[in-house]
Image: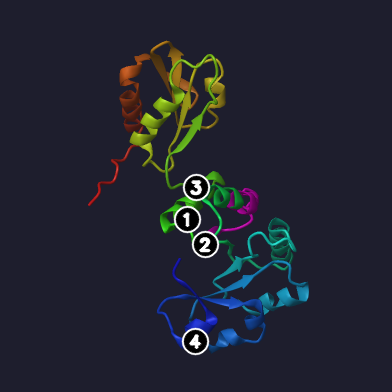
Amino acid sequence: MGVLTPLSEQLTKPLPHAIVLVTLDELSSDANKLLPEGTRFAVTLRGDESYEQLDVLKSVDNITMLLHNIPYGEEKTGRVHAARRLFEYLETNGLNFPVIHHIDFPKSIDRDGLVIGAGSNVGALLVDGLGDGVLLEAASQEFEFLRDTSFNLLQGCRMRNTKTEYVSCPSCGRTLFDLQEISAQIREKTSHLPGVSIAIMGCIVNGPGEMADADFGYVGGAPGKIDLYVGKTVVQRGIAMEGATEALIQLIKDHGRWVDPPTDE
């Protein structure tokens, strides 16, 4: 997407190829016209502005995207409600700007709190088709964690696949193998297959029905034996558990869905 930089900084210390952040007030005062022609800019807004304030969006057609941003934890306005109001306004007025959900978390946020906050504030909108992406900020967290959380959120909302999707049963007394151990083994060898979904089910009682739309299934068929599925159709029965993971990998290869994992340089 590019580097984002505030308008005031871009005017004083220009950053090549940056996307410039312009507030709604700056847009209303034509401050964006101080930028060189062709500069990409994004408008950051809250969603709870008056319709009269939002109307300035109708007069500008070269906006790269909108960033919806309400400070995390603010009690004055509910983020989800404000976002839905913004999308309703855009649809009513025929405005098709891409919208990115931007959450700037406080330094005190821990990883669990960030994941829950992102899911409840953004996931609820993305699953309804409201939004085109997510931008998570947290000064106390590493970039890799923020990136992975963002991609996980997009994949969970069926917007972008960046890794293998797994479906697993919750485990019960009928489970015929150590579900957590086997799941970890399969994930270790297959997690690099974006667009592929694998179901790992402990037994055949409910397993096939719970596999949803998985491409491949690994199901406990009998003690020490595994059945393999393509979709909801069993294709191999009674495979010894010791070789079942490799048999699953070969099945994925046979159906043209396998790629070799990337190598560390």
Q: At numbered mark 3, what does the secondary structure look like: helix, strand or loop?
A: helix
- Residue 176, placed above or below residue 150: above
Are circles 2 and 3 on residues that touch, CB within 8 Å?
Answer: no
Disc 2 target residue: 137
Q: Where does the image place residue 65, in percent across and percent down from the top left?
A: 56, 69
Name the front one of labels 4 and 1: 1
N-terminal of the two: label 2 or label 3?
Answer: 2
Question: How many residues crowd mark 4 within 10 Å: few (<14), some (14–19), many (20+)?
Answer: some
User: Residue 91: percent from the left, percent from the top?
Assistant: 70, 63
Q: Is residue 208 left or right of residue 178?
A: right
Element under label 2?
strand
Q: Residue most toward the top?
A: 223
Q: Quadrant for residue 224, please give it.
A: top left
> Residue at label 1?
146
Whole-angstrom CA distance, mark 2 to mark 3, is 15 Å
Q: Which residue is mark 4?
A: 11
Kind of residue sitting beneath label 4: Leu
Is residue 132 highlighted in magenta? yes
N-terminal of the two: label 1 or label 3?
Answer: 1
* Residue type at the position of mark 1: Leu
Measure the alpha-carbon separation of dots 4 and 3.
35 Å
Q: Are the residues flagged by discs 4 and 1 in contact, CB closer than 8 Å?
A: no
In primary-sequence order, the first of circles 4 and 3 is 4
Range of residues picked out in magenta: 118-136
- Disc 2 + disc 1, Cβ < 8 Å: yes
Mark 1: secondary structure: helix
The amino acid on which the numbered mark 3 sits, given as a three-letter code, is: Asn
Q: Position of residue 38 (x, y in %)?
A: 48, 81
Pair 1/3: label in front: 1
- Quarter of the image with the N terminus is bottom left
Residue visible at 28% across and 40% down? 260
